[in-house]
Image (tube, rainbow, N blue to C red):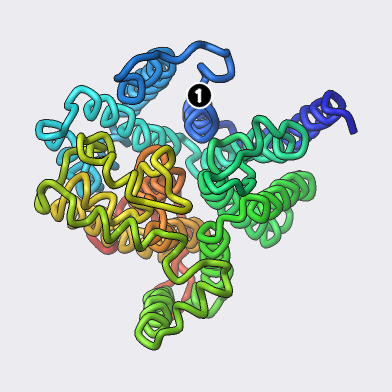
Amino acid sequence: MSTLLATFVCACGIAGLFYLDRDKTYRTSKALWLPVVYLCLSWSRPVSFWLNITPPSGANAQLEGSPFDTAIFLVLLTAAVGVLIHRKSKTGTLLAANWPILLYFLFCLISVAWSYHPSVSFKHWIRATSDLTMGLIVVTDARPVVALKRLISRVGFLLLPTSVLFIKYYGVLGRGYSPDGRQMNTGVTTDKNLLGVMVLVLSLCTLWQVITLLRSQGQPDRRRRLSAQIILLVFGVVLLDMANSVTSIACFILGGGLILIMGLHVIKRRPTRVHALCLVIVLLAAFAQLLGGQDAILHALGRAPNLTGRTDIWAAVIPAVPNSVIGAGFESFWIGPDVVKFQRAMVGWWHPENLNEAHNGYIEVYLNLGWVGVVLISLILISGYRRAVAAFRLNPSVGSLMLAYVIVSAVYSITEAGFRSPNPMWIFMLLAIVSSTGVTAGFFGERVTRDRAGSRSSFPMASAYRSGSVG
């Protein structure tokens, strides 16, 4: 098939997916297109690349970035803030309930004061706030569940088929080479790991949609919408294999397994068993570490015992943090004056041009924000877990997805910088935590729960939240 014909077929296929997935039963706000555009731009190449706009030159080009791309994101952020101001009642409730997230962003802002380049760090902070802002757009929608499904579908329909097209027919765009000469598939992104995590977060929600549709008999146009989601899930599975990102593949298996298990009647009937399920996962990982089984697991996953050089990076950068308590400043460690010597010290896979993160979310936070940042991230994870479990008690379907995102993000960040903007896992962890709060606050409508005797009962979650009976 020629390149032109393949492009035409891909465009028709994307249009067909949008047609199959259409649903006129519920309407969502047009503002939902703001996070759709934001995610598409954040996870692919910059607008300046597609428009062939010459990037800035000079010594500070890497620090300053493209003014054109910055302007695009500022427009999106300004529009999103305007929408949230209009929805100030719901926005205020969600922000007040998620004070650990606000505390983390506040400390990030304060840390700009001692960063190596305060103006650059402040720009990164402004961009990072967009991750939370776009999530709030989804949760404050009049139909937040429908909004979440449409967000995933729209982004997935646009990016996943296009990634396959780029890999197969546009090698210059869809493929690249590692410093040691090995070919890697990147799709619409700039790196195979970014492709992997993008597919991971989209495919988890797509799998959840497929399961939900299979269990929802009698919905209008169910078969047509189910067909669209199954096709999108197939694209996701194929791209996970193409990306060859072991971390993303393992996390997809983990997250998908959690969603399936939490959908079992035995778990939904007794939501407290979710704690036991998560505890089993932690204990299995601990026993594998204590009994030396991690080498066998890594070998089975195609990883070297040193995690493809990651442990060498960790050993080199941890002692280099300028202040162990408060770090180097928000997004500042890798643009500091001493980082070049660490880049040059890494041999093999890690070369100066591609060593700009610690490949561990917790260590990455430590480098930039010190132990204070690590404590704040831990607080976000603990709070997020509690809120997701509370959401599961009230709405098992939505709660299972949110809990899966929280657990997967904690595991994913062991070998990747998963708490860094605009990493897809970071964005969806924030979205999951805020959505869980939305469930307990009643934004997702009335849902069926169970009392201690196991009988079915229904009540408004807003009143339950105010009375303190949940999370």
Image position of 79 with respect to 314: above or below: above
Residue 334 seen from this side? yes
Residue 208 appears at what percent x and percent y?
A: 59, 56
Q: Is residue 85 left or right of residue 248?
A: left
Q: Residue at x 39, y 40 (%)?
A: 352
Question: Is 64 left or right of 292, judged from the image as shown?
Answer: left
Position above or below: 203 against 46: below
Classed neighbour count for the residue bearing mark 1: other residues with Cα under 10 Å, few (<14), some (14–19), many (≥20): some
Q: Position of residue 88 (x, y in %)?
A: 29, 29
Position of 85 with respect to 285 (left or right) is left
Left or right: 161 in relation to 63: right
Which residue does the image show at 43% across and 59% down from the upper left? 412
- Towards the viewer: 121 or 88: 121
Residue 30 at what x, y percent from top left?
53, 23
Q: Residue at x 20, y 46 (%)?
A: 99
Q: How many marks?
A: 1
Secondary structure of the residue carrying tag 1 is loop
Give residue 344's position: percent from left, percent from top: 34, 44
Q: Nearer the viewer, residue 323 or 467?
A: 323
In the picture, the quarter occupied by the C terminus is bottom left
The residue that mark 1 highlights is 46
Res. 464 in view: no
Q: Amino acid at mark 1?
A: Pro
Which residue does the image show at 51% across and 16% down from the upper left? 48
